[in-house]
Image (tube, rainbow, N blue to C red):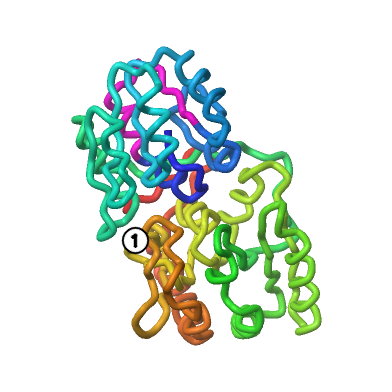
């Protein structure tokens, strides 16, 4: 069981491979939720998924107990409900995180300290190591083939992902700067794919019109099949520029040249993992304060505005230069991995 966040689920794929390698004949059930299903569908090594509603405790407890689990590993870090579900699961052995201020460690037989001074993937690795499983597997995704590539007419598209999930306004970069960045990156052939989730359709269409008014070629892209079509688009991208969110982690995991724009997030804690990635952090003190994802009260609200177009453009040039220099990672059709 892991966090319902999409990015966390993609990072979790690495330790899932560790568990599969250690127990090749075990039945592995991934307890997932509607919120992270798009990412969960891309994870290899799972025998089946158990879809639960995190906020319906009686039904969730019943469904988990029906599995008659031997072991339950809970990779969520702050949700007290998942600790409660572990405690009531009926599993013969449970393991999870002891997270400062969350009072959840008593729910498990074994705990690992969830720390703010290391990347979330390293926190995940600490949990599997705590139960005696070696950890070093790559983030691994299995992307189904498609009969037709999305935006097939766009060769080497540049992907912009503007919108975050929680506290979105504080994690988004001003639209004027996206347009200025696009002008600096554009060639006559460049098509900018504006990606988003189902709830972003209206603002994606509106931003597309702004790009068109600025003389730039763009196309809104809202995938209709979870992350599958989006994954195909990302791995064809010349470069992906994204706020720090699940799509950023997806692009990095697929080997796409990826630039993350951080404000409240800190690159060392939540940045993209891969060989062709760059994290751009806001200048000056007081930013990068997010640890579990909700610590906004009393913090700076201008972190994204303190990241300039020149800072992001320089990061784009660096990842493009690494690709040209031949240090790119080849794409693999069925299972694609990046090592930290």
Look at the picture and state if 82 lies above or below 123. Answer: above
The answer to which quarter of the image holds residue 278 is bottom left
- In-front residue for pair 166/252: 166
Look at the picture and state if 156 lies above or below 98. Answer: below
Name the residue at 39% across, 55% down.
292
Look at the picture and state if 41 lies above or below 271. Answer: above
Residue 208 placed where, x, y %?
76, 71
Name the residue at 75% across, 74% down.
217
Question: Is residue 147 toward the left or the right of residue 181 in the image?
Answer: right
Look at the picture and state if 236 lies above or below 262. Answer: above
Residue 109 placed where, x, y %?
23, 27
Q: Which residue in the protein does label 1 denote? A: 269
The answer to which quarter of the image holds residue 234 is bottom right
Can residue 327 be seen in this snapshot?
Answer: yes
Is 25 magenta? The answer is yes
Quadrant containing the N terminus is top left
Q: Which residues are magenta?
A: 15-31
Name the residue at 47% across, 21% down.
64
Question: Is residue 107 toward the left or the right of residue 81 in the image?
Answer: left
- In-front residue for pair 336/226: 226
Question: Is residue 157 toward the left or the right of residue 170 in the image?
Answer: right
Can residue 334 be seen in this snapshot?
Answer: no
């Amino acid at each position: 069981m892991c966090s319902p966040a999409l990015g966390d689920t993609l990072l979790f794929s690495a330790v899932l491979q560790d568990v599969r390698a250690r127990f090749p004949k075990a039945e592995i059930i991934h307890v997932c939720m509607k919120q992270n299903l798009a990412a969960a569908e891309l994870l290899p090594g799972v025998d089946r998924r158990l879809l639960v509603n995190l906020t319906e405790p009686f039904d969730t407890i019943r469904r988990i107990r029906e599995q008659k689990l031997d072991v339950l590993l809970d990779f969520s870090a702050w949700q007290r409900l998942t600790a409660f579900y572990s405690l009531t699961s009926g599993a013969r052995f449970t393991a999870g995180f002891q997270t400062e201020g969350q009072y959840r460690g008593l729910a498990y037989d074994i705990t690992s300290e969830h720390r703010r001074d290391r990347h979330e993937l390293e926190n995940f690795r600490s949990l599997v190591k705590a139960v005696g499983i070696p950890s070093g597997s790559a983030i691994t995704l299995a992307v189904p083939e498609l009969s037709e590539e999305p935006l097939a007419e766009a060769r080497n598209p540049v992907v912009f992902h503007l919108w975050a999930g929680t506290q979105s306004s504080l994690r988004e970069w001003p639209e004027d700067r996206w347009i200025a960045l696009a002008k600096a990156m554009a060639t006559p052939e460049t098509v900018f794919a504006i990606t988003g989730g189902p709830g972003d359709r209206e603002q994606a269409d509106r931003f597309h019109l702004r790009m068109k008014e600025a003389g730039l070629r763009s196309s809104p892209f809202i995938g209709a099949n979870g992350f599958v079509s989006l994954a195909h688009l990302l791995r064809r991208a010349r470069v992906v520029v994204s706020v720090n969110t699940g799509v950023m982690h997806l692009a990095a995991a697929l080997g796409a040249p990826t630039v993350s724009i951080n404000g409240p997030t800190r690159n060392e804690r939540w940045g993209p993992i891969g060989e062709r990635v760059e994290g751009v952090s806001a200048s000056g003190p007081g930013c990068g304060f997010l640890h579990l994802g909700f610590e906004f009260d009393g913090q700076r609200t201008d972190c994204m505005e303190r990241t300039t177009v020149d800072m992001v453009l320089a990061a784009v040039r660096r990842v493009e230069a690494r690709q040209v220099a031949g240090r790119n990672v080849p794409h693999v059709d069925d299972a694609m991995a990046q090592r930290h």
